[in-house]
Image (cartoon, rainbow, N blue to C red):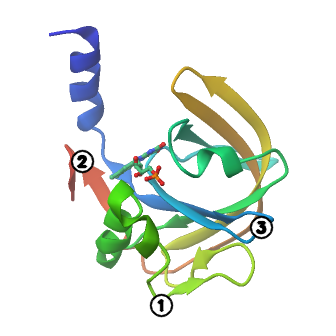
């Protein structure tokens, strides 16, 4: 097996938390993408990183100083994860009634909403590492996070 195949297998053993990164452009266009690559960086400043494929629709809208929200999904939000990771379902991405799209789009019933502003964009081959500081964060007391392991929701 190639190093890529072995690496892919190793990464499939990780248990990931599933989030949707959402934003709105200056023109009012809404974007959302399912992501598992969210990692906190530091508490001072409160900051995180997320890796975004350069081929994704949202990629060009992620600019320095632009805002986005990380919506950590709950176990009953698997459908939203599927819609936001399917190229065929772009039109349905904001159909769920729990989206609040007035300002930075966010899911009001998510496990957590982490609002961020982009500080740095670091291109790395197929992906861009988006480094952002947190402007506001809320979370629900009962933890019921949607997880993903070995290619399936867990
Ligand atoms: C559980 C899960 C986690 C994912 N994590 C990421 C990620 O961290 N970064 C990324 O660029 N794509 C990730 N993807 C893939 C994108 O969600 C998918 O390619 C999406 O269709 C791209 O958006 P687009 O269709 O608007 O171009 C993930 C998909 C799933 C199902």
**Location of mark 2 (residue):** 149
Label 3 neighbour load within 10 Å: few <14, some 14-19, many 20+:
few
Mark 3 secondary-structure assignment: loop
Question: Front-most of 120 and 135?
Answer: 120
Question: Front-most of 153 and 95?
Answer: 95
Using residue 143 as the reference point, say whether residue 115 is left or right of it: right
Task: Determine which quarter of the picture holds residue 154.
Answer: bottom left
Mark 2 secondary-structure assignment: strand
Using residue 139 as the reference point, say whether residue 77 is left or right of it: left
Image disc number at residue 27: 3
Residue for point 72% across, 48% down: 47
Which callout, 1 or 3, points to the residue nearer the camera? 3
Label 1 neighbour load within 10 Å: few <14, some 14-19, many 20+:
few
CA gap, disc 1 and disc 3: 22 Å
Looking at the image, is 57 positioned above or below residue 1? below
**Location of mark 1 (residue):** 97
Residue extending furthest right? 65
Task: Determine which quarter of the picture holds residue 153.
Answer: bottom left
Q: Is residue 48 visible?
A: no
Between discs 1 and 3, the one toward the N terminus: 3
Residue for point 37% across, 55% down: 87
Between discs 2 and 3, the one toward the N terminus: 3
């Amino acid at each position: 097996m190639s190093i890529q195949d072995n690496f892919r297998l190793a990464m499939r053993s990780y248990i990931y938390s599933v989030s949707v990164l959402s934003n709105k452009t200056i023109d009012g266009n809404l974007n959302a993408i399912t992501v598992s690559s969210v990692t906190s960086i530091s508490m001072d400043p409160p900051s995180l990183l997320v890796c975004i494929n350069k081929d994704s629709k949202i990629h060009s809208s992620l600019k320095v100083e632009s805002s986005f929200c990380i919506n950590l999904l709950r176990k009953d939000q698997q459908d939203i994860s599927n819609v936001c990771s399917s190229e065929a379902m772009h039109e349905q991405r904001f159909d769920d009634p729990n989206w609040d799209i007035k300002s930075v789009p966010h899911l009001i019933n998510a496990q957590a909403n982490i609002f961020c502003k982009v500080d740095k964009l670091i291109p790395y081959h197929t992906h861009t590492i988006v480094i952002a500081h947190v402007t506001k964060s809320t979370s629900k007391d009962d933890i019921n996070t949607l997880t993903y392991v070995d290619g399936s929701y867990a």
